[in-house]
Image: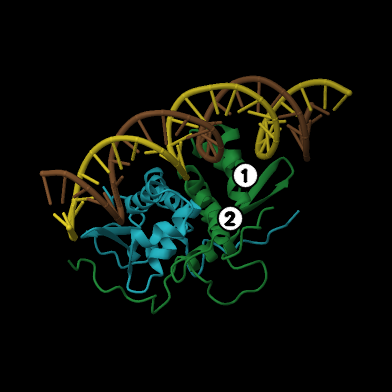
Chain colours: A cyan, B green, C brown, D yellow
Amino acid sequence: MSNQALFVLGGTGERGVCCPGLLTAPLDEGQAVELAKVFKALGDPVRLRLLSMIASRAGGEICVCDLTPAFDLSQPTISHHLKLLRQAGLIDCERRGTWVYYWLLPDMTDRLAGILTRPVGGPVPAPAEAPS
Amino acid sequence: MSNQALFVLGGTGERGVCCPGLLTAPLDEGQAVELAKVFKALGDPVRLRLLSMIASRAGGEICVCDLTPAFDLSQPTISHHLKLLRQAGLIDCERRGTWVYYWLLPDMTDRLAGILTRPVGGPVPAPAEAPS
DNA sequence: GACCTGATTCGACGTCTGTCTATTCAAGAT
DNA sequence: ATCTTGAATAGACAGACGTCGAATCAGGTC
């Protein structure tokens, strides 16, 4: 159950349109639960660094053995964080011989970016911030 | 210390350019810690729903008294979640008479969207997903 | 086969988080 | 001044989370 978390996120099928969006209409319970899983995965400094290392890697993928030494953490801990990122649908991996390689799944980050992007008009510009 | 969390996020000054980005280069420790605080604030279904209710509100702001009854939670719990969103720099509030009104701070969501957006070229398209 | 190395899984443990009730604070109304 | 209502704070507590060491699994080498 990796990418089951895609309700608002765009669904698994084609979905050209630009996402309902967090900022345009109230999320319902189920949507919020699914979305929260993904943001929760991003809510840890170690996982953010892992994700950015994976995403920015020239060639598109990186070996666990190149990730681990960048942290002052045990190897099982890194493995744990990678698992959470994978369960959130942000990355995927494959074993090749002795090593395991990870890569970004850009669909998910694209969807998140879309969800956080305000529509041109917005729900209404907001009158001002300090009336009194 | 509300908006102290803006390193990668764009800084407090003007910063027209489109953010270093999570996906283009490895985040350093400090950047990751600050960014994680914001994503952590988004990593809860209740807070996501609160944020979306606030953001999508016509007029730009909403009274706490309109938020609370939408949830099956105690009033202090809602207050607690609003505080976390505020500390993350995602919303702000103001008391007007008996009531307290909240509104979105779009700068933060804009920055997050930018951070999650891949640059046109990308760090390199990624060769393919399943070599072997 | 036995052995070695890279990576994941398992259990345990301390900390952090979400929730509650009770209390306090702020602003009006009587 | 006292009371009432809306909201925030304080303290408590169960459950989730991040980390570790030990054990297990997957491949390759000898």
| Relative image position of residue A112 (x, y in whole percent) | 41, 60
3D distance between C-alphas at marks 2 and 1: 10 Å
The chain containing the residue under callout 2 comes to B
* Front residue of this view, candidates A15 and A53: A53
Frontmost residue, A89 versus B31: B31
> Is disc 1 surrounded by few (<14), some (14 to 19) or many (20+) residues within 10 Å?
some
Disc 1, SS: helix
Dot 2 alpha-carbon crowd within 10 angstroms: few under 14, some 14 to 19, many 20 or more: many
Residue wearing tag 2: B90
**Chain to which mark 1 belongs:** B
Residue holding disc 1: B83
A42 lies above or below B69: below
On the picture, is D1 further left or further right than A88? right
Q: Amino acid at mark 1?
A: Lys
Against C8, is A119 above or below?
below
Q: Residues at marks 2 and 1, common chain?
A: yes
Question: Residue shown at 41%/70% (left/top)?
Answer: A56
Residue B11 point in image, percent of width and height? 63, 67
> At 37% across and 49% down in the image, what residue appears?
A84
Q: Which three-letter amino acid code belongs to the residue tagged 2?
A: Leu
Asked if A44 appears above or below B130 in the picture, the reply is above
> Is residue B10 in view from this perspective?
yes
A71 above or below A37?
Answer: below
Q: Check if mark 2's residue and mark 1's residue have beta carbons within 8 Å.
A: no
Residue at 51% over, 49% down: B40
Residue D2 placed where, x, y %? 83, 20
Q: Secondary structure at mark 2?
A: loop
Q: Is residue B53 visible?
A: no
Residue B128 picture location, percent across and down: 24, 71
